[in-house]
Amino acid sequence: MLDSINAVLGQVLIVVLLSLGGWFTVRSRFVQFRYFGRMFKVFAGAFRHEEGHVSSFQALALTVAGRVGAGNVAGVAVAIALGGPGAIFWMWVVGLIGMATSFFECSLAQLFKTSEPDCTYRGGPAYYIERGLGMRWMAVLFSILLFFTVLGFLAVQSYTVATSLDDSFGVPVPATASILLVIIGIIIFGGLKRIVEVAEWLVPFMALGYFAIAVVVIAMNISEVPAAFALIFKSTFGLEQAYGGGMGAALLYGVRRGLFSNEAGLGTAPNIAAVAHVRHPADQGMVQALSVFIDTLVLCSCTALIILLSGNFGSESGSGGVIITQSALAGHVGEWGRSFVSIALVLFTFTSIIYNYYLTENCVNYFKEGNRTLLIILRISYLAFLVWSAFQDLSFVFAWSDVSMSLVACVNLIAIVLLFKYGMRLLDDYDRQIKAGIAHPRLNPADFSDIAIDPTAWVEEPDSEYASH
């Protein structure tokens, strides 16, 4: 039953996400392309850290922790095996379109964020739905759906880590569960600031490490790289005989892989984007759009090239995605490549577990702001579910997670469409300041006094180094 529902919802979600992403791109005058260079300038300034606040880079690191996961290692391999090399082209297309969607949902999360007593912020779809649309029932529905979606994600991630370490290194599942319990417990009981500090250190390390091994593989096979790209384009448009009949499969699996890898439009990333301390919401929108680029155009492409340059991706089409990636890397660098993929998978999944905890906390906090007792109960429950999931056959949980994810995405996308006028106001304000020669645009809360924003979230400390001019 759930599989049938998921099949229908999955197809609908793909069409809606692509259509709206294209619409956001056109209406914003291709914001992800005209500001692509500036994204890196904003990213460079994201390391700026006001005392007591979460920096833009820390929020980016935590978001990348969620976007980058098992799908980057295994999902891309499955897309190639089932849809052919042409799936990678559609994955790129979806990533580029998704950058616009992510820009708007994360800019809106910044605009409607609320200030907390400890100098942090809260925000996300539930907040911009209630404050921007005045529809509390819809915000409640979103929070409930997101909560159960995240639990499904957690179950998948816990099971993946436990089974991967058992299969690759012989680490017993109970031992892995115990280690996760201790380490994750220490991190989440430290609150948001400890969570982002861990992500700030671990995410660049794991992402750069995976990127580095891909660069090594590319360098080792540099003469074959043009042929690999030619294969992608030929199979995309049916010019490669082996995949000519699979154009539909390439489109389907490429689009699905891109959408569910970068999460643009699903309503997860805005919960993290809202916590950053920035001058203008559009700055964080750009940083988050860049995270989509990092996930889909960079890291997913790393996996794709490792596999395509191995030349044996077709022969293992019946294998699991992780096995395909492991075999491909081992063919390039030796058997230690299998262990490298396993370690990368564990790190990607570990950071996703931390990311998903914060999503559950944000859902609970929406209903009861700052209730310490409730947060302690949540943390204990999260850890208990984490351990339990490591031992389970989770086919039902997987199916339910897919259904709830589609539903929560639909709620979020409806909200973005209804709030799009405010997203465009933010972008127009940003454009105006850039054209006026202001190097670092700032949000003036008075310009948005007709909207139910929290003006205390936009009290800017004096900053002569970055002052507008």
Image (cartoon, rainbow, N blue to C red):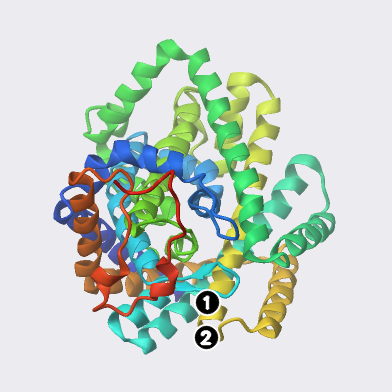
Which residue carries the number 1 mark? Answer: 363
Report x, y in % for residue 378.
Answer: 67, 78
How crowded pointer 1 is (Cα within 10 Å; few <14, some 14-19, many 20+) is rated as many
Residue 5 visible here: no
Q: Is residue 196 above or below residue 394?
A: above
**Element carrying mark 2:** helix
The three-letter code of the residue at mark 1 reads Cys
Report x, y in % for residue 35.
Answer: 26, 42
Q: Nearer the viewer, residue 107 or 8?
A: 107
Report x, y in % for residue 425.
Answer: 20, 64
Q: Is residue 399 above or below residue 139?
A: above
How crowded pointer 2 is (Cα within 10 Å; few <14, some 14-19, many 20+) is rated as few
Circles 2 and 1: CB distance less than 8 Å? yes
Q: Nearer the viewer, residue 377 or 383?
A: 377
Quarter of the view holding residue 369: bottom right
Give the quarter of the figure containing the N terminus: bottom left
**Element carrying mark 1:** helix
Q: Is 231 displayed left or right of 400 in the figure? A: left
Real-space Cα distance between discs 2 and 1? 7 Å
Which residue carries the number 2 mark? Answer: 367
Report x, y in % for residue 258.
Answer: 38, 48
The three-letter code of the residue at mark 2 reads Phe
Instruction: Please report the residue visible at 56 percent of the width from the left and 80 percent of the height from the top.
Output: 364
Q: Nearer the viewer, residue 281 or 339?
A: 281
